[in-house]
Structures are given as C-alpha cells and as structure tokens.
Image: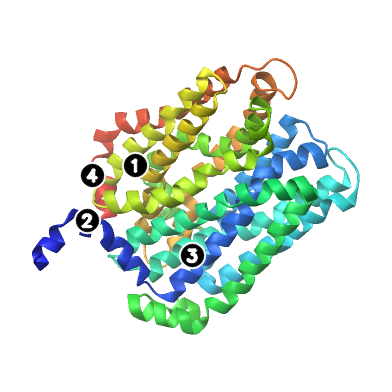
Amino acid sequence: MSEQDRKASPLRELLDPFVNIVRAPRALWAVNITYFLEGIAYWGVLTLLLLHFNETVGLNDAQAGWIVGAFTGGITLAMFFFGELADRWGIRTALILSLALMAIGRFLLAASAGFGGNGIWSPVFFASTGGLFIVILGYGMFQPAEYSAVRKFTTAKTAAMGYAMLYAVNNLGGFLPGIISPPLRASVGITGVFWVYTAVSVLGAFLIVILLSKKALEQATAETGADVVFERGKRTRPPFRFRQWLKEHPLRDLRFSFFIFALIPVQTLFAHQWLTMPPYVSRAFPGWVSENMELFVNLNPILIFVLTPTVAALTSKINVYKMMIAGTVVMAAPTFLLAGGPHIGALFAYILILSIGEAMWQPRFLQLAAELAPAGKTGQYMGIAQFPWFLTKVLTSTYSGTMLARYCPDAGPQNTGMLWFIYGCIAILSPILLLLARKWMGNRLQAAHA
C-alpha cells in the first residue's frame, strides 16, 4: 500500500488519533491518571450520597435531593469563580491544592457518622455538609485546571483525542465503584466505602506531586510549543479589573450563550444519574438488581470510556453544531423507553443509547469551550461554560425528590413510567431548540472551532 493510500485509508484515519495521543507528553498522562482516580472517588461518593443522607443523616427524599443538588451545583458554581486560578497560579499548583482540599473534604464526610445526632441541623449533618463544601472548593479549580492542561499539552493533531481521552478516563474511574462498592457496602456500610474513596483522593494528590514535576511540565511545553511562564511563577497578566472582565465576558456573545443554555434540558438526564437512578433502581427492581444498584447506575461510565475516543476519532471532522443536534437527540430519545415501566431490558437499552448520545456531543462541547478561549483564559472560559450546568443541577434537585416520592416511593404504589415520560419530554427540548436555531447560529460555532 502506498503512502497516499495509507493516508486515505479509513482505518488509518481511525487509528491515527489513538497513535498520536499515546505519543503525547508524560505530563498529559499524569493529568489523565489523576482524573481517573478522581473519577473513582467522585462518582463513588456521589452514587451513595442520597442513601447516606437518607440512612446515616436521617433526611427524607426531598431534603436529601436538595443537599445533593446543592453539592453538585456548588461544584459547577465554584468553577465559575475559581476556574481561572489555573491560569493565574499555574496548572501544577492548582491541581495540588484542589486535590488536597478534596481529600480533606472526603475525610470529614467519612468521619461524619461519628459526630452523632440525626436529622437536619444535627452534628452528623453539619459534618457531612462541611466536608462536601470543602470538596466543592477543591473541585471548583480542579476540572478547569485539567482541561487547561489538555489544551497546553496537546497539538492540533492530538487535541480532539486529548479532550476525549480525559473525558473517557474519568468515566472509566466512574465505572469502577459499581464493582468496588456493593461488596464493600455489604460488609462495612456506606461509611466504610467513603473511607476507601478518601484513600483514593489522597493517592491522587500524592501522584500529581510526583508525576507532574516542573521538569515534566517543561518537557511537555517544549514539545507542544505552549507558554510555560505561568508555571515559573512570573506575573504575565494585568491585575483584575471588574469592568474589563465584564466587557470581555463570553456570555455577552448571544449565540454562545444560547448554545450553552439550550443544553440545560438534556443535561437534566446527567443529574438524574445520581438524583433519581440510585433510588429508582433500588426501589423498582427488587432482588439482585437492587442489591447491586451501584453496578447498574455506573454502567454509563464504562460505556463512555469505550465509546468516547472511538466516536471522537470517527467524527472529528464533522461540524460541531450538527454533532450537538444529533447527539442530544440520541441521548434524550431512550428516556421514553423507561416510560413503559421497570423492565430490565429497557433499563439496559436506555443506558446504552444514552451513553452513545453523550459520547457524540459532550466531549465536543468541552473542547469547543476550551478552544473558544483566548490565550491565558482557558480556565475562565471553562468555568463560565459550566454555569448552565450549575443551573441544571440546582433546578433538577428542586423537583427530583418530590417526583420520586410521588411516582417511585420506597413504600406504596409506583408509577415509574410517568416519571420517565415527563423527564423525556424535558430532555427532548434541547435538540428541538438547537434545530430551530440552526440558521440563526449560522457558522458562528464552526468558525470558532476552526
């Protein structure tokens, strides 16, 4: 086969992005390892958080939903304010500090049962929410720093796969609690599982100190041609000025603002992965399925790990906006499968099709948000692009507990089909909005991506 034939080969086009990312700098792989471990800790805790506030703290469904919604929403809000710290302090400093804070917060959460009491405003309540607040502070700078690192440590050839792999390894970490958690929860309870995830957080903080050394940073930036001055501690940005910040704010761009806010309806399905799915599987599927709830709830992450890099390689040349429309349709549609009632086949089909849709659009959206940012402002733009995600988490938590109590109570008659039919009607609004606005959006996002 000639060189020209190899370049034109579809198989070659599929494999090249994987080959390029394997050859990426060691610093990028340090970031991926950290995000993998954080995926284990974050999703492992989040899957059990509603049950923790139900069983250990003694809150009802609505109260527990509000707290979990405030936690997940608080993380996104923290990114809005702290996202730019990686730009100001440097990626290494931001990652070390953020991982240390998250380890401390999870330590307090794991220890909360020992504080005693029951119900809202009890000592165990304050210890639990205090630990979650510290995690919020850490995560607010963690994820923007991770995506800033990908932008800095990749080239034009490796960027799309770099973002996809970061998203994928986090989801791989999110799958492992489905295997780890059930036997641990059966033997040592939810509190014991939280201690395991605290140890994982400590390991992540330790590894980033070792692997993301200043030498590794200099080698990575030398290979990619990125600017390393922030890592050397030099002040290269002007002091913060509120008027200038407001003038340059990306939300002033109406098309960009519409684009990110139109995704809120379909993003509610992400929030239902931890606000609705754990109690739904536990209550609507008795027996072995209920006993291994974490496994079913965390099937989505392992599918995302497999699907995301593959979809990225196959669709890297497709218009971003078209991918958004197609991906949100595929993600929203299977929700109506659950409207037929709690059938295990429908549950598997829902998880699989939803995951395909997520793999089609979510990493591309994150890549676009990072690449829209001017030099030195990637963290800020990543934080701002997450603001609608904050609204999604908060809004979804205000009604998810009430909907569970009405349509999927722990005791009494259930109507889970109506629950998911309503959620499907909400989710399908996103692709409809994007489709209706396609002419107005024009080539704005395509040009920005290019």
Labels 2 and 3: the sequence-earlier one: 2
User: Whole-Å distance between the Cαs marked 3 and 1?
Assistant: 32 Å
Residues tagged 2 and 1 counted as in contact (Cβ below 8 A): no
Q: Which residue is mark 4?
A: 443
Q: Residue at left 67%, top 56%?
A: 135
Residue 265 marker = none
Q: Residue at left 51%, top 18%?
A: 340
Q: Residues within 10 Å of mark 3 (few under 14, many from 20)?
A: many
Residue kind at label 2, given as amino acid type: Leu
Residue kind at label 3, given as amino acid type: Asn
Spot occupied by residue 427 in the image (x, y as percentages of width and height):
46, 29
Q: Which residue is mark 1?
A: 255
Labels 4 and 1: the sequence-earlier one: 1
Residue kind at label 1, given as amino acid type: Arg
Q: Which residue is mark 2?
A: 11
Q: Which numbered disc, 4 or 3, marks the residue closer to the eye?
A: 3
Residue 32 marker = 3
- Residue at the limit of the structure toward the front, as seen here: 288
User: Whole-Å distance between the Cαs marked 2 and 3?
Assistant: 26 Å
Res. 104 visible in picture = yes
Labels 4 and 2: the sequence-earlier one: 2
Residue kind at label 4, given as amino acid type: Asn
Residues tagged 3 and 1 counted as in contact (Cβ below 8 A): no
Q: Secondary structure at mark 1?
A: helix
* Number of residue marks: 4
Give the vertical position of 333 relative to 78 (above or below). Answer: above
